[in-house]
Structures are given as structure tokens and as C-alpha cells.
Image (spheres, helix red, strand yellow):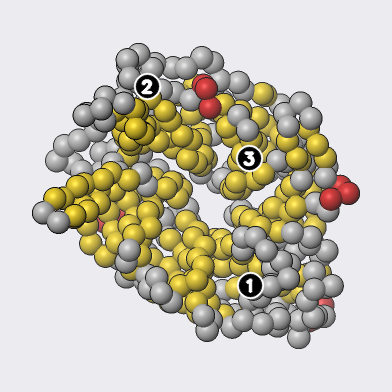
Amino acid sequence: MKILVKSAVLALSLVVLSGCARNRVVSSVDRENLFSLEYGNFEDELNLFDFGHSGEINTSLCMRDGFFYILNGEAKKIMEMNSYGNLLTLYYNSETNPPPSFAGEENAANSTRNAVPYPFNDISLITVDSRKHLYVVERLPLERQENDAKANLSLSQVILHFDENKKFVNYIGQQGPGGTPFSYVKNIYTTDRKELVVVCTVPTGMTVYWYSADGFLLYTIPIEKQNIPNPFVEENNDYFYSLDNIVPDYKNRTIYLKVDYFSSYVDASSRVQSGIEYVTSLIHPFKVEENAYEMPVTIPPYSEEVSEGFNKETYDIPYDFLGVTESGWLYFILSTQNGFTVQMVQSDGQRILKRNVELNREANLYYSFSLSREGIISVLLVEREKAYVAWWRADSLIQAVIKN
């Protein structure tokens, strides 16, 4: 096991990438609805609205190799479905779900469906590797949670591990199988090496835990706010920065830090600091094995024009970091009035694609995105009457660029 601690702030120069190689053409990408889900308590239905509990909706989506894994936290179950909406496997808490109609069929020689009872408590996130091993973020009951008084942290979450035969293997904590629970888990990922990556939020920033295919800890990477690279460190003005997200690479042991930078805003008339204004966003690739940063990549913001009377103001808004593909394209997304804008940036910053994704705001109540390793954007859309699983084949755009 290696514990990597970052050195002092690196004086990295701001890389501004521009030129004719960039493609900034904005157009729409069509949404393809794959299947719908009714609301209810049956095995192939969603139960999202539990009026007995308050708080955020813990339902999420993961797509891998054309199969969809829908984690329905409110119902304490996970549905594995094909692209036609046929239920293949149901992992479920038998105390909160009726037995599925096909329970027991898995013992038959020609059975294509599986029912897997497991006492889920409070599940929220999911990822799947190429072996079809399933990893699930689970919140422990209060009596099993721990406290880290020194770091002022509540340690309450673990990662449940199921193998390709739908069997529970173990739970993974900070040190590996059976380890200390995590603090708040922001997201989990699996790589092409079948390695698990867990990104946690802590008071000082974020911590990344990197595990082998067997679940044993390889690296712990603390990302502390005060040590995040700041290219403006020698400037006289006050600059602030915010760590938006961390996403691992599929092929290499590299993580990508997306950082938004801001500066103090001084009112011209009163010469008094009246707020902060957005400056730029950078992706900082960090090589885990070398414990070193590579040169950052500038991520252009979304520009929105606002009219007031005869005056027009243009505001730059940073995108949210959605993820990275196996070919190294960085995906960013931003909510707009008519849906979303997706920006795809090549890892060297030389090419940029932008596409609008239309979404009916009035009809949509909740959504959960999933970015596949190929670059397909899948979404679970929750509307009043039913929910839909759809995707946008943004991967075809990238393939066209690669061929050219």
C-alpha cells in the first residue's frame, strides 16, 4: 500500500489552448428513449416517492456494455435490465419488497433471470466492471457507524461487492475488505484493469482510494484544498478556487481534478470589494504512480447573454465535470433553460465539441446521468406518469472526429 501526499503548491502556468483545430460548432444531439418504467412496488417498477422520509432521492443509473443498472434507493433494490427494459436480475431487500414473480427460476437450467435477496439499508451509488462485478455504496446502520474525532468525520459508508454469479463477496472499507467505513462517498468507478476507485469528500478537500481487482488497497490520495495547483499564486489580486470533481482514467492510474478559479471583484466606482467573479476552469491530470501533476488543460466556460433594457451582459459559467472516456475525451455538462449543454474536450485540449441536449423542464421531476467508457450519455428521467431510460449517442460524434 502506498500513501501519496501532495507536495507544496505547484506553480503551474495557465495553458491556454486555441487554434483552428478546435471545433466549437454547437448543434443538438437526438435523444433515443429506450424503455419506460412504471411507479410501484413490483419487481420492474420504481418506488421514488416515500413521503415518510425527507431528503434527497437516492436513485441512480449505471450503463455498462448495453446493460442498465438502476439503483432504487427508496425501494432498497437494484434492477439489471437490457436495452429493451427486460428485467434480468433483481437485488432486493426482502423486508421492503415482495418476492419477484420469478424467484426460484434461477435454479432452472434455462433461467435467464435472477432474484438476489440482500438486506440493503441505505444504498445510493453503483458501478460495474467488465466481469459484471457489482459495487454498491451502502450506508451502515447507526450502531455500526464510527467517528473520527481527530478529523471531525462521521464514518458511515462502505462498498458492497457482488461477483458475476450475483453472490455477495464482502464489503470494502478504507483499508480494503472489512476496513474502516468511509466518510461521504461522492462517487465510485471501475477501470479497465477491474480496479475500484472511490472518491470521498472530507473537510479538507477530497480523498481518493484506489483498490486492486480483489479489493485490496493500492493507493490513498489525499487532495487537500490548500495544495491544489494555483497558477495565480504569484498574482497580486486575491484568487479563490473550488475543487468541483475528481474522475479517474480508465486505462492509466491517473486522476483528473476539475478546479474552478475565481478572483475578488472590486466595484469600479466605490473601489470596494463587492464579491467574486469567475476566471477560468482547469483540468489537472495527476499521475498516481509518479505522484506528480501533468500540465493542466483549460476548459472553456459556457457563456450566457442576459439583456436588461438596452443593455446586454455576457456571463461565463463553469461546466460540471461529468467524466472521461476510454479514448481520453473529457465530458462536461451544464443545465440550461431548454435542457443541457454538453461539452466534450480532447484530453490535450486540441478539439472541442459542443452539443445541446433538449429536455422538457416542466415534465421532468428528477434525472440521473451515466457516462459510459465509450462516451454514451445515458439518463434516467423521472416524469409525473412514469420514468424513462434514454441515451444520447455522443460516442458517434467522437468516432467521427477520430476518423477525420
Would you place residue 69 above or below residue 124 in this image?
below
Residue that carries the numbered disc 2 in the rendered image? 238
Q: Nearer the viewer, residue 17 or 309?
A: 309
Residue that carries the numbered disc 3 in the rendered image? 200
Cα–Cα gap, marks 3 and 1: 25 Å
- Whether residue 179 sits left or right of residue 332 in the image: it is right
Q: Earlier in the sequence, mark 3 or mark 2?
A: 3
Q: Earlier in the sequence, mark 3 or mark 1?
A: 1
Label 3–label 2 contact, CB within 8 A: no
- The three-letter amino acid code for the residue at tag 3 is Cys
Label 3–label 1 contact, CB within 8 A: no
Q: Position of residue 6 (x, y in %)?
A: 56, 20
Disc 2 is placed on an element classified as loop
Q: Nearer the viewer, residue 275 or 322?
A: 275
- The three-letter amino acid code for the residue at tag 2 is Asp
Q: Residues within 10 Å of mark 1 (few under 14, many from 20)?
A: some
Cα–Cα gap, marks 2 and 1: 45 Å
Q: Position of residue 12 (x, y in %)?
A: 37, 19
Q: Depth-wise, is mark 2 or mark 1 nearer the camera?
A: 2
